[in-house]
Image: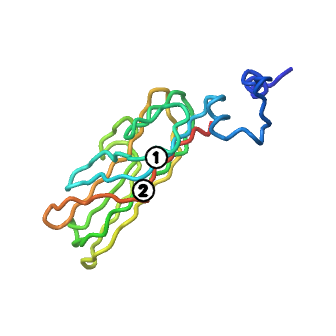
Amino acid sequence: MATARETQLISIFDPANFKSTKELAAAEWDKALGNSYVHAHDSTTSSTSAWADVVWTTESVDVLGEFNGTIFTAQRAGIYAVSANVITASYAWGTGPNGDIQMGISKNNASTTGPVFYQSFHIVEAAITTSIALNVSCIMNLAAGDTLRVKYYAARTGGVASALTGGCGFMIARIQ
């Protein structure tokens, strides 16, 4: 008796166009098996003391077409590994609320007070001029139709906008 995985593999076999397992790219297998995988990077999103959705300018992989540049919408229920990182351009950051930077992964557009995974970075000791990197990684249980987005918040002296720069990334993979 064939297992479920063997049955799925048989359904994608095409004798006229046969490739060995080693020849098939991971994205081809994921698409054939219905597995989600998205990788997006680079953003010029900016924040002026308010939460903003990160808009990703480059999408490297989107196996099932679940990502629109800002919002990922799960086609299938399952357990997903999610990771995001943002890097600000180099700015003069103040102390206290004038040096507050946050980034979060929001499920179903939850507010910042709801179920959102986030990392906060506060510069409180002394003013500094630098770029700052924030990272969030988590495992999330998603139902079909659930959405994920990355949100970014930065407060700088005088309410000056703080933009993200190259090196940012967003990765989502269905693992179960």
From the image, tell me which residue sits under label 2: 168
Mark 2 nearby-residue class (10 Å; few <14, some 14–19, many ≥20):
many
The answer to the question of whether label 1 and label 2 lie on touching residues, with beta carbons closer than 8 A, is no
Point 28% across, 54% down: residue? 153
The x and y percentages for residue 80 are 55, 40
Point 34% across, 45% down: residue? 55
User: Does residue 131 appear to the left or right of 143 in the view shown?
Assistant: left
- Name which residue type carries label 1: Ala
| Total marks placed | 2
Residue extending furthest right? 1
Q: Secondary structure at mark 1?
A: strand
Quote the CA–CA distance across marks 1 and 2: 9 Å
Residue 47: name its quadrant. Answer: bottom left
From the image, tell me which residue sits under label 1: 40
Q: Secondary structure at mark 2?
A: loop
Point 33% across, 62% down: residue? 88
Residue extending furthest bottom? 126
Q: Quadrant of the C terminus?
A: top right
Q: Quadrant of the N terminus?
A: top right
User: Does residue 16 appear to the left or right of 134 in the view shown?
Assistant: right
Q: Nearer the viewer, residue 33 or 110?
A: 33
Q: Nearer the viewer, residue 138 or 7?
A: 7
- Name which residue type carries label 2: Cys
Q: Nearer the viewer, residue 24 or 130?
A: 24
Residue 72: name its quadrant. Answer: top left
Above or below for 68 versus 167 = above
Point 38% across, 46% down: residue? 56
Residue 48: name its quadrant. Answer: bottom left
Residue extending furthest front? 16
The x and y percentages for residue 77 are 54, 29
